Amino acid sequence: MNRSILTPEQRAAYDRDGYVMVRGLFDPEEAKLLQQAMETDPQVREHFYNRKDAQGLATRMALWNHPGDSVYGLAARSHRIVDTMESLLGGEVYHYHSKLTAKEPFEGGAWEWHQDYGYWYNNGCLFPLMASVMVALDKCTKENGCLQVLRASHLMGRIDHGVIQGSQVGAEPTRVEQALKHLETVYAEMEPGDGLFFHCNTLHRSDQNRSPNRRWKVLFCYNAARNSPYIEHHHPFYTPLEKVSDAAIKEAGLKFASGSGDTFLKTFVNPPELKKTIEL
């Protein structure tokens, strides 16, 4: 049974454009719980690291592989998310990883054009049977560096990726330049609790945050169970995902991650396959 929260029109938009916006994916109470957890959970705070852009401005990040029972882990395991991902990817999925990206006022860094599968391909995932949902924790606008997506770019297939400048990996610039001539750049402006589902081959980027308003968001990323990597990497092989009811988020309240924190990555280093430098 298809339990996706997407309407037929939204599903058609995802297939056509490579992304779809769902307003109010999490209601204000749920969005506030997610925001507070990201701000105050010791495991998140202890595992922040920076990824710098070409000008040296940084986005602060925290990344974890297994969702667990924290309020944000329950959100990643909720029926509204997982059932929708299973509909989009055509079968059982598992949690590939989640991450917080935090752009602070006046100094949050930019992200270059890239595809998530540009990285995940090198992790041993054979097929682009992968997708993410980005959930806004703050109001996301052009001014504070909201996500930009290139409409229908997922239809281009995977593009070669390499180190652009600083520590970031981006898509091959000449091909991106040509894509920009043909496809529409869309600014994904969002309110807290809004969600953007997007295909792993959708090109996306974001500007620096030069505004007085911070821009925090959390991403939940999924892989099809039948697409488990064939090599061991920094993200997990297939592990069964136990879904929880949509009510579990409010029932849990402000619940933090438990355990030793081993599921969090202490830092993130580009794998050898992505350390080649490509010219701008």
Image: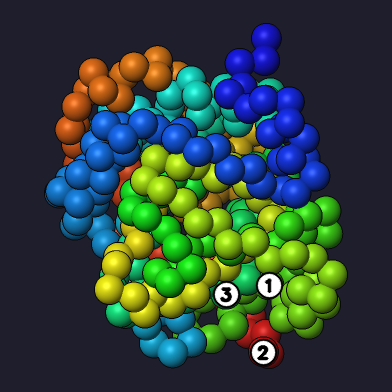
* Residue 175, picture quadrant: bottom right
Q: Residue at x 19, y 56 (%)?
A: 45
- Is 218 left or right of 4, judged from the image as shown? left
Report the disc number at residue 171: 1
Query: Separation of disc 2 and disc 3 at Cα?
Result: 11 Å
Amino acid type, callout 3 = Glu
Question: If you read the primary sequence from the N terminus, does the residue marked by circle 2 or circle 1 appear first?
Answer: 1
* Residue 74, picture quadrant: top left
From the top left corner, tell me how far across and down residue 184 is, in percent.
Answer: 75, 64
Q: Residue at x 77, y 80 (%)?
A: 177
Pointer 1 local density, CA inside 10 Å: few below 14, some 14–19, many at least 20: many
For mark 2, what is the residue? 280
Q: Secondary structure at mark 2?
A: loop
Question: If you read the primary sequence from the N terminus, does the residue marked by circle 3 or circle 1 appear first?
Answer: 3
3 or 165, nearer to the observer:
3
Task: Give the answer, above or below, for where 146 lies relative to 138.
Answer: below
Q: Determine if residue 96 is in view.
A: no
Q: Secondary structure at mark 1?
A: strand
Amino acid type, callout 2 = Leu
Q: Residue at x 44, y 90 (%)?
A: 55
For mark 3, what is the residue? 112
Q: Residue at x 33, y 44 (%)?
A: 263
- Is 276 left or right of 156, judged from the image as shown? left
Q: Secondary structure at mark 3?
A: strand
Query: Separation of disc 3 and disc 1 at Cα?
Result: 8 Å
